[in-house]
Amino acid sequence: MRVFFTADNHFGHARIIDYTGRPFSSIEEMDQTMIDHWNFLVRPEDTVIHLGDFAFGNVETVQRYLSQVSGRIILILGNHDRRVNAFHRQRIEVWKRAVLSLPGGKRVFLQHRPVTDKEQWRGSSFQLCGHIHQKQHFDPKIINVGVDVWNFAPVPSEIVLGVALDRVVVLE
């Protein structure tokens, strides 16, 4: 099992192409590209920690996108994840935020929006976030895992954290 991180797919959200300057000519092209990239990397036994804004649409639409991507999904709710009941009906865990335990005692704070007040990080070494789309954060301890900066694909833990994870330990 491997662990991946991602955020801000906005599956089914046509306007996100213009808002963020994504290089797609249609919502269908964008969605299929992200699904193909996801499934190329992620096996059914892998875990994807999604830091919010998974998909737009009604419950059936969200479930349709969930059914097309591989792996176990842990969702950290984003500001556009309004169809929470759609997530609860699938193979998915839902959190508002979380702290992840890494080998060697390091901790990683996970939240959709970047938090610059380090008091809120609860003793974590650094933070993973989404929400800011194509922007990188200027603090090297805040890492944007959004698809806009990772070639529209989930990023493996060994790249973003510097350590391969074979399990996920969520502390809160």
Image (cartoon, rainbow, N blue to C red):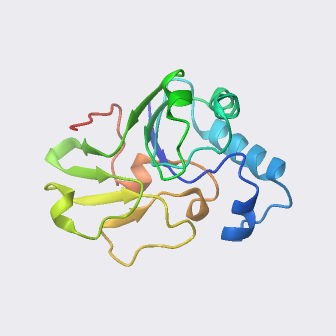
For this view, does 29 lie left or right of residue 134? right
Residue nearest the observer in this picture, 7 or 13? 13
Residue 121: which quarter of the image? Answer: bottom left
* Residue at (76, 55) in percent of width and height: 14
* Residue at (83, 47) in percent of width and height: 28
Quarter occupied by the C terminus = top left
Relative to 72, is 8 above or below?
A: below
Residue 83: which quarter of the image? Answer: top right
Residue 23: which quarter of the image? Answer: bottom right
Q: Residue furthest right?
A: 25
Where in the figure is residue 33, as x and y percent of width and height? 75, 48
Number of on-image labels: 0
Where in the figure is residue 16, as x and y percent of width and height? 69, 61
* Residue at (26, 51) in percent of width and height: 108
For this view, does 48 lie left or right of residue 171? right
Relative to 12, is 42 above or below?
A: above
For this view, does 32 lie left or right of residue 127? right
For this view, does 71 lie left or right of residue 66? left
Where in the figure is residue 35, as x and y percent of width and height? 70, 41
Residue nearest the observer in this picture, 41 or 99? 99
* Residue at (41, 58) in percent of width and height: 129
Quarter occupied by the N terminus = top left
Where in the figure is residue 158, as x and y percent of width and height? 40, 49
